[in-house]
C-alpha cells in the first residue's frame, strides 16, 4: 500500500518539484493550495510528467473546515508543509499578512492534524532563521535570529514546533532549512514562475536573459567576499525535492522500527555546503547559455548579509542525502525552463 502525503503549497515552485520526487519514490500525493502565488497549471504539468493524475484541492491553510474535510476524507502518512508567503520586501510592507498566513495558518494546520492523530510533519523552513551567521559553514545548532518579518515567521513556526515536541512526544517534526533553491526540472516543463518582478536572483537573471527585464541589479559590491558581492549556497530544486523524500523515508524507518518512536523536533540544513558569489553565478549563467546578462551595481539592501552557506553533514549522516547537481546544472535547467516558457505558466 502506498503512503499518502498531503502537500500544502504543492502547486508552488519547490512543492511541484517535490510532488514529482514523491511519486517517483512510491508515495501518493494530495496537493492543497490556495493558488495565491502559484498556478494550477503547475499541477497539470506535474501530472503530465509522472503520467498519472494528482488530486488537487483548492484551499487555504487558515480555513479549518476545509482542512478538516481533507483529513476526514484521506488517511495520510504525513504532511509536507510548503504553503507560505515568501517575499522579504512584501513581508516588511505587510507584516500582519505574513504572520497571519505563515504562523496562524501553520498553527491551524497542526491543530487539525492533532485532531486526526496525524503527527508526522515536514516543514519548509529557511536559512533566514540564522540571521547574520557567526560561523561558516552554518551548523543546525547555530544561534537563530531574523532580520525581517518573513524570516521571523519561519523562526516563530520553528519555536511552535519545538514547544509542540516538548508537550507531546508523539510528534515527528522535521524542519528543513533551505539555503538558496534555484534551477528547474530537467524536462523544462516546470520551473520557477514568480508573480511580477522576481524576488530571487536566478529568475531575475533568466528573465533578463530572455528579454523580459532590461538589466540585473546586484545589491552591494563591497562585501568582504571573493569579489565583493554576496555569497550564497545555491541548491538545485531537484536535489531539494529529494531531500524531502529522504526526510519522509527517515520517518518511515523510525515508525517501522521495533520501538516505532517519533523523532520530536529535528532541524536539518539542505544545502550544498559551498558558497557561490552573485557575480560567479551571473558569469556561469552567461557562459552556459551564451546569453548577455547586463547588470548594474546598486546599494546593499537592508537585512542582506555577506555570506551564507550550510554545513550539510547532518543531512548526509541522518538522511543519507546530499546535493549532487552543480551550478552549471542549475543554470542549464533554469534556462531550458525560461527559454521554453518565457511567460511562465501563463502561455499568453
Image: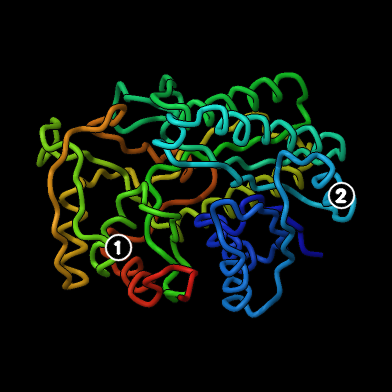
Front residue of 35/164: it is 35
Few, some or many C-alpha atoms within 10 Å of disc 1 (few <14, some 14-19, many ≥20)?
many
| Residue picked out by circle 2 | 69
Mark in front: 1 vs 2: 1
The residue pinned by badge 1 equals 207
Residue 171 is left or right of residue 87, and the answer is right
Does residue 251 lie above or below 159 as drawn? Answer: below
Q: Earlier in the sequence, mark 1 or mark 2?
A: 2
Q: Position of residue 294 (x, y in %)?
A: 13, 59
Q: Which residue is depicted at the point 17% across and 34% down?
A: 299
Q: Quadrant of the N terminus?
A: bottom right
Residue 318 position within the rendered picture, expressed as x and y whole percent measured from the top left: 53, 42
For residue 157, which quarter of the picture? top right
Q: Is residue 51 left or right of residue 12?
A: right
SS at badge 1: helix
Residue in the image at 32% along x and 62% along y: 330
**Who's the residue at 60% across and 40% down the image?**
123
Amino acid at each position: 500500500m502506498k503512503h499518502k502525503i498531503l502537500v500544502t503549497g504543492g502547486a508552488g515552485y519547490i512543492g511541484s518539484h517535490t510532488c514529482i520526487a514523491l511519486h517517483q519514490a512510491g508515495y501518493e500525493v494530495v496537493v492543497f493550495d490556495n493558488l495565491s502565488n502559484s498556478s494550477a497549471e503547475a499541477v497539470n504539468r506535474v501530472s503530465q510528467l509522472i503520467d498519472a493524475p494528482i488530486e488537487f484541492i483548492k484551499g487555504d491553510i487558515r480555513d479549518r473546515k476545509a482542512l478538516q474535510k481533507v483529513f476526514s476524507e484521506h488517511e495520510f502518512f504525513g504532511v509536507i508543509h510548503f504553503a507560505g508567503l515568501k517575499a522579504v520586501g512584501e513581508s516588511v510592507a505587510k507584516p500582519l499578512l505574513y504572520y497571519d498566513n505563515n504562523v496562524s495558518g501553520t498553527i491551524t494546520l497542526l491543530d487539525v492534524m492533532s485532531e486526526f492523530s496525524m503527527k508526522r510533519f515536514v516543514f519548509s523552513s529557511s536559512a533566514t532563521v540564522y540571521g547574520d551567521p557567526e560561523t561558516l559553514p552554518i551548523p543546525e545548532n547555530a544561534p537563530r535570529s531574523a532580520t525581517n518579518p518573513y524570516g521571523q515567521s519561519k523562526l516563530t513556526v520553528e519555536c511552535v514546533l519545538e514547544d509542540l515536541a516538548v508537550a507531546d512526544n508523539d510528534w515527528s517534526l522535521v524542519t528543513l532549512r533551505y539555503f538558496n533553491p534555484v534551477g528547474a526540472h530537467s524536462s523544462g516543463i516546470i520551473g520557477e514562475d514568480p508573480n511580477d518582478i522576481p524576488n530571487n536572483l536566478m529568475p531575475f537573471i533568466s528573465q533578463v536573459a530572455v528579454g523580459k527585464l532590461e538589466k540585473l541589479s546586484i545589491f552591494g559590491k563591497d562585501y568582504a567576499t571573493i569579489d565583493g558581492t554576496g555569497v550564497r549556497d545555491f541548491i538545485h530544486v531537484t536535489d531539494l525535492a529529494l531531500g524531502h523524500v529522504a526526510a519522509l523515508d527517515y520517518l518511515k524507518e523510525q515508525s517501522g522500527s521495533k520501538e516505532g518512536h517519533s523523532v520530536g523536533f529535528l532541524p536539518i540544513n539542505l544545502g550544498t555546503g559551498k558558497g557561490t558569489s552573485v557575480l560567479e553565478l551571473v558569469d556561469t549563467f552567461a557562459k552556459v547559455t551564451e546569453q548577455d546578462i547586463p547588470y548594474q551595481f546598486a546599494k546593499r539592501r537592508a537585512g542582506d548579509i555577506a555570506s551564507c552557506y550550510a554545513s550539510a553533514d547532518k543531512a548526509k549522516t541522518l538522511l543519507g542525502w546530499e546535493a549532487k547537481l552543480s551550478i552549471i546544472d542549475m543554470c542549464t535547467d533554469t534556462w531550458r525552463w525560461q527559454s521554453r516558457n518565457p511567460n511562465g505558466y501563463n502561455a499568453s
